[in-house]
Every structure is written in structure tokens, then in C-alpha cells.
Image (spheres, coloured by chain):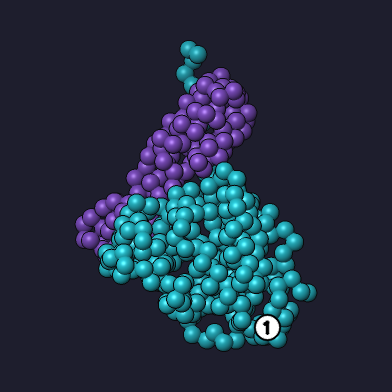
Amino acid sequence: MSEHPRLVQVRQSILKRNDVAARALRERFHQAGTYVVSLVSSPGAGKTEFLEKILGQLRGTDRVAAIVGDLATDNDARRLARSQAPVRQITTGTVCHLEAEMIEAALEGWPLEQLDFLFIENVGNLVCPSTFDLGEDLRLVLVSVTEGEDKPQKYPAIFHTADIAIVTKTDLATAVGFDHQAAHRSIQAVRPGIEVFEVSAKTGAGMAPFLTALRSRRAAARPDRAPPQVGAGRPAVAHASGSGDRPRTPAGAGHEPPSIEDSPRQFGSP
Amino acid sequence: MHELSLALSILDIAEEQSQRHGGRVAAIHLRLGPLSGVVKAALISAYDLAREGTPLERAELIVEEVPIAAYCPACAAERAPISVQELRCPACGAPTPEILRGRELDVVALEIES
């Protein structure tokens, strides 16, 4: 007790375990050519309905699946399953967020290389999910018009980890006196430059531009796996390291994107 | 309640390091950024719960909150943004999307008594 304690430098992230798992997942998704999108929001912001519409609309052209995290029920998973896309549920019990290892466990037995898009619906919570990387390519943060325009100000950390913001339930905007300009100002204040989409999953308004953006993001991130119909979008300069370390493409296939339009669309068929 | 699982991670790190260096851990120094998504008070109370009955029962958690730093493209310099809610340069008002520091959630040092 009387001795002076020694000070030992450590410098280790508390999140190391999750970060290591997330990095492994990201590498796996990249290898498989699966583009992974996660959704975060407060409870009731409309993640499930929005995702149900996305799955339904992408299913005609892309191979899609979803993982949904929920505290106790499988209600959301059952709603998503109506889209006919394969859905898996993670019941987190009392845990208020998903972690990379939970995703890893949920993927057990799923042939990722047969998926173009995998969506991960996080537990409804604007705080805890911000801390945990899931290995996803793209994180969407949703905020509904009924929540108030200053939501981003109250939860800046989650907006910081997000790549795209989605304003949902715009069909209710007039009824609740939603101030579009104030909301956009608020989002841009905490996350300058973030792309924002306004959608109504109920009426379908705004879904098309969002899906176009989603496809071009995937095309940029997975240039050798882009569906033939996607031409526009920015040049694929990002993720340049990916092309060299993917042994999936047969030798000589070089720059030719593999044709996938004839392959069966059902997930799970060999 | 993700603070509890983080508190357990802190104990794991400290336990592993104390075995490596030998001796009893008197304090754990942690650096916490405002964009880490973790609230200091919540983390400390979770830690107080988590350490009970462990070899680290008497190890104090000392949390240093570090300020946010961003790069201002207009000034071409590192700046402390106006606030976490308002990521703009305090000097010129330009948006500062590029965050340099502020997400820290790191154990940086241990005080060890032999």
C-alpha cells in the first residue's frame, strides 16, 4: 500500500474484440461479393416497414436476405418474411444492440456468395448501436417525421457512424407539421455532407431514388459483381484493394463482370 | 445497457495486463471520446457493478474525457468543432466532416502496485 504504483502504458480499445470480429466479417462479405447494409433508428421509426419494401422491390432483380435483431419477439422477422426474402432473427434478450459476433453466429450455414444484398436491422435504439461495428458496408440511420427535427442533435454519435440518413413516414409530414428544412439542417450539422433521402414506405414515395443510390453504392463497392443494368454511378475508385485479393473470379476473368442474370434468384439453391 | 459489456471488457484488459506485468491493479485509466456513444457516468456505475467480487475489486476507474478534433478543409488545419451537435469550424464556419479524434474508448494505462 505504501509503495508508489507503477504506471503501465496499455493503449487498447475496449472494442477490440468486436472490431476484430467486424473486420473478419467485412472481409468475408467482400470475398463473397455480398453488399451489407445495416439499419439503425429509435423504436418505431419505421425500419421494418421500410426494409420490407426494399426487400420486396429488390427481390425481382437482386438476391436479397435480411437479419433482424429484436429484444424479445419475432414479429419483425415475420413481417419481413412476407417479402419472400430469406430472413433470420437474432433475439438479443436484454442486450440493446447487435454485435459483430452475433452476426457471425446468425450467418451460420448461409451461402453468402449467393447474395447480392444482406440487410441487418438493428435493435431499435439510437444510443448503443453506435458503438458497435457490424462489418457492414453501409449504415442507414432512420428518423421519422413524427420524432421531431432535432433528433440528430440529441443523438449525434449514431449519426456519426451512419453513411446515409433516411427520413421516414413522409406521408405524415403535413399532419405533424414536419419542418423539412430544419430537419435537414439538423442532420447536416451533426454529419456534414451526409446523403439524405425522404421516403414513405407506405405510399412508396421516395423509394425509387433511394434504391438507385443503393445499387450504385453496391456497384462502386463490388465493381466486379455489379448487375448488368447498373451503369451510372461514380467511378469505382474506392475499395481498390479489393480487386487484388479476391480469388473468387476465375483466372483470366479480369475486368469482365460475371453475368449473373441467368442464375437462379432463390437464395439457398446451389 | 451496453456499458456493462464494455465494463467487462475493461476488466478483461486490465486482468490480462496485470498478469503480464505482475502486481495488483490500483487504477485503470480510460480515454473516452464524445462520439464513442458511451456516457461516462453510466460506464462508471456499470464498472462498479462489474468489478465486485473480482480480483480487480479495488481497481479504480479513472475516465478522461477527450475533446473532439476535426480537420477544417477551408483553414487546412486541425480545429475543435463548435460542438458535437455542430460540426463546423469555429474560426471560419466551414463544415468539418472529417473527424480526427473523438471516438476513443481506450484503456491507456494501468497503475500497478507490486
Kind of residue at disc 1: Ile
| Chain B tint as drawn | purple
Q: Is residue A34 visible?
A: no
According to the picture, the residue beneath numbered tag 1 turns out to be A260
Classify mark 1: helix, strand or loop.
Answer: loop
Residue B10, x across and y down, in percent: 54, 36
Q: Which residue is pictured at 57% across the width and 87% down the height?
A: A229
**Total marks in image:** 1
Q: Which residue is pictured at 31% across the width and 67% down the height?
A: A175
* Residue farthest along the right direction in this orientation: A270
Q: Which residue is pictured at 56% across the width and 19% down the height?
A: B114
Residue in front for this viewpoint, A70 or A79: A79
Residue B59, x across and y down, in percent: 51, 25
Q: Is residue A211 left or right of residue B93?
A: right
Residue A243, x across and y down, in percent: 62, 73
* Residue farthest along the front direction in this orientation: A175
| Chain A tint as drawn | cyan
Question: Around disc 1, counting alpha carbons within 10 Å, would you say few (fewer than 14), some (14 to 19), or many (20 or more)?
Answer: few
